[in-house]
Image (tube, rainbow, N blue to C red):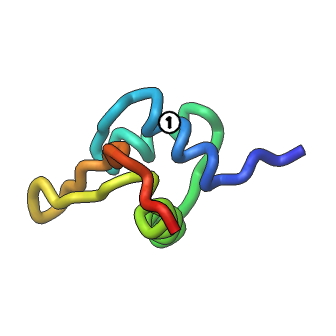
Amino acid sequence: MKYPLRNLIYEKVKQAGNMTDAELASALSKDGVSLPEAELNKVLLDLEIYGLIRVTWVTKEKRRVELATEPART
């Protein structure tokens, strides 16, 4: 059974608390998951829309990915 990519990325962020997008890509590649930057951006956007994570720009090239303090309610 294939573990959904969205869940895998959420678990990585949950374990670390917060990390940069480069650290997240590195952690995923260590687990054997290689994905294009566009796909990573799409999944991060989905998780942010669901209210599970927050993505903020640190520098022009680096983003910080962290857990949202309180999940959004629908």
Find residue 51 and report its horizontal and vertical position in percent: 43, 59
Percent coordinates x, y for residue 33 in the rendering: 63, 45
The residue most toward the right is: 1
Q: Which residue is drawn at 59% across and 51% down?
A: 34
Left or right for 42, reference 55: right
Q: In this view, does 35 lie above or below 22?
A: below
Question: Residue visible at 63% across and 48% down?
Answer: 7
Residue 29: tell me if it is visible: no
Q: Which residue is drawn at 72% across and 52% down?
A: 4
Q: Nearer the viewer, residue 68 or 22?
A: 68
Residue extending farthest to the top is 15
Residue nearest the viewer, comparing 53 with 59: 53
> Which structural element holds mark 1?
helix
Where residue 15 sits in the image (x, y, percent)?
A: 46, 27
Would you name the residue on which mark 1 appears? Answer: 12
Quarter of the picture containing the N terminus is top right
Residue type pointed to by label 1:
Lys
Residue 22 in the image: x percent, y percent?
33, 47
Looking at the image, which is closer to me, 70 or 39? 70
Q: At 11% from the left edge and 64% from the top edge, which residue is drawn?
A: 60
Q: Residues within 10 Å of mark 1 (few under 14, many from 20)?
A: some
